Image (tube, coloured by chain):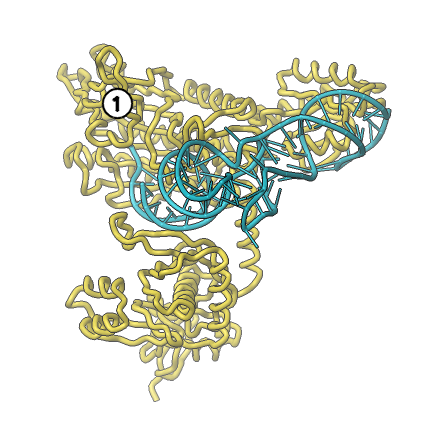
Amino acid sequence: MNTITVTFPDGNSKEFEAGLSAFEIAKSISRNLAEDAVAVKINGVVKELHTVLNDSATVQFLTFEDAEGKHVYWHSTSHLMAHAIQSLWPEARFGVGPAIETGFYYDFDINTKLTEDDLRTIEAKMMELSKQNQSFVRSELSKADALEYFGKVQDPYKVEIISEIDETAEAISLYKEGDFTDLCVGPHLPSAGKIKFVRLLTVSGSYWRGDEKRKQLQRIYGISFPKKKPLDDYIAFLEEAKKRDHRKLGKQLDLFSIHEEAGAGLIYWHPKGSMIRLQIENFWREAHMANGYELLYTPHVGKSWLWETSGHLDFYKDSMYSGMKIDEQDYYVKPMNCPFHIMIYETKLRSYRDLPLRWAELGTVYRYEKSGVLHGLMRVRGFTQDDAHIFCAQEQIGDEIKEVIRFAKYVWDAFGFKELKYYLSTRPEKAVAGNDELWAKATSALENAMKDMGIDYEVDDGGGAFYGPKIDIKIKDALNREWQMSTIQFDFNMSARFNMTYIGEDGKEHQPFMVHRALLGSIERFFGVLIEHYAGAFPMWLAPVQVVVAPISQNFLEYAKSVTEQLRAAGLRVELDESNEKIGFKIRRSETDKVPYTVVVGEKEQASESISVRKHKVGDQGAFPISDFIAKLQVEINNKIVN
RNA sequence: GCUGACGUAGCUCAGUUGGUAGAGCACAUCCUUGGUAAGGAUGAGGUCACCGGUUCAAUCCCGGUCGUCAGCUCCA
């Protein structure tokens, strides 16, 4: 009998008989391991649990806790869902059904339009099938046989996929689970019984192969878990996200509105929202001035010459607000600020001594976004970019990029976002501007800046804009969701089209490098993310109302007014609750408004010239002299403390 | 833009299988002057998104438009 050596991730190894399956090996080690394992990694490749080992190998058992294990688990769940759909609607034809980062989906073609209720029916069917605990069985066919098989079951989608597989490819694999057979590379769970808790989330349309010219199939998204607790946690997470939805909180807290009769995707900032925005902008301006930027203001419209020169009328006319005639000339609302900054650059002959120029503007732009993509503050038609353009000489690009990254980190830190992720996007196929040399220099400037700063980054090969490479920065919010916010992009297109130059040390004309960067992205979207991040409970420095003063009864209104005046004199944003309500009601109102502090004053406080302080979500803090309270709040504001 | 769902008072929602509507909160007035998350009474408030069609009659059925929501596609 042959023996093989199996090495485990912890470095230990053990002898086994050849010909045992990974599952049997797991069982011999621990019953729990065999129970929890969903797949196995043999010599670094993910395989099914019943894969037979004939040679010595490194073996790592994957459970649902591993990302790769989850992937297998969810992929098998998508098959189980397709199986359930096929049982319920036998005419169903299937597109693709992969696992995704959180869960899975499957695209399919059936005559019925599914509703939320149907999702519950499908879930029930899946549970019924799971109880049958059928194995996932792999089989392999030649391309011709596979085509014949799916031709016979008349699935045009699978036939299309198979017909595109390379002739020279090895056998095509199918997976059968019960009476459902699917084209699939695997790997899968040993059997469907491992799928214990399933939640189907949404049903919607999706284009076959992502092509908007082709048929729209129905797609169901779902997620599944081997235990109940993580499913409950996930549902709780979804509910928490729903509670924090900036559209809901924006209404509740009276921050902003959108008016269908006045135009979709256009934001109205209410007094409280405006106050928060003012704080954001004040910080932004001061930070820029303190970090080597100069501030600009530029117009909102420009003549067609500008947009012809910039190329926007060629590339983006469909998403520009249509032109308006003024004095027989076509003017367009600006979709970008860059051309305006360039106009300022070109008002005089620039010398290398002037560079780098760092010009920043909170520039409001308008872009036509398709009606179906608008989403609260996150995707709008009119928004204010926290834009800046850096014009510099080639030898300065490395330092400039580093400086932008350092500054971006500083700004995100101030808003309470500590975790940033960096992505480098390189030259795409569709690149039309710049030559090989420019792309190479700019790309390495971006890459080296991150390397020098010890920053980990991922590379999105070919993900750059057509006019230059870029770094994108994503942030993680309080619910661990990622948002793409900052972008640092080289632009070879504008500088060339506007024929920008500076006179170098050598007395000759050179084309400056142009870097386009936005940190917050758009103020609107940033505000949306901020609302959700803080769940509407803004830290003191941003809170539109920092303190509510609530007298116990009308008898103490005069004292309450005096307290309010003192707090306002210290620069705090204070509201006095003069309403003829009980203190309990006033407290409730300031709590639901998420005001950081509520100051209660009555007979006691008036007598001792003090105030009682209640902190949002925490409760009564007891009595303080007013000056102590002011000093404490000023520390909180100045240090941008997040509670 | 595409597929589907949806649009009733300022907000959150009931309701009418076709006979023009209701609650809670918010708002106004009055009573109450109360110590840490909702005191009481009364009142006002709606062209049932908009435009057409069918019908004796449309908020309800049909068509279109606008908008919202979940995705898809897109995002300089």
Chain letter for the yellow part = A
> Numbered disc 1: what chain?
A
On the question of residue A11 being in view, the answer is no
Q: Can you say whether A626 is above or below A201 in the image?
A: above
Describe the element under mark 1 as helix, strand or loop.
Answer: strand
Q: Where is residue A527 in the image (x, y as percent from the top left)?
A: 48, 31
State the image quarter where residue A395 is shown.
top left
Q: Can you say whether B3 is above or below A295 in the image?
A: below
Tell me the kind of residue under disc 1. Answer: Cys
Q: Position of residue A193 (x, y in %)?
A: 48, 73
Q: Where is residue A120 in the image (x, y as percent from the top left)?
A: 51, 61
Q: Check the picture and name the quadrant holding the N terminus of chain A.
A: bottom left
Q: Could you tell whether B36 is left or right of B74 in the image?
A: right
Chain letter for the cyan part = B
Question: Which residue is more in the foreground, A77 or A369?
Answer: A369
Question: Which residue is more in the foreground, A8 or A477?
Answer: A477
On the question of residue A586 being in view, the answer is yes
Question: Which residue is the site of mark 1?
Answer: A392
State the image quarter where residue A510 is shown.
top left
At a point 15% along the width and 67% down the height, the residue shown is A167
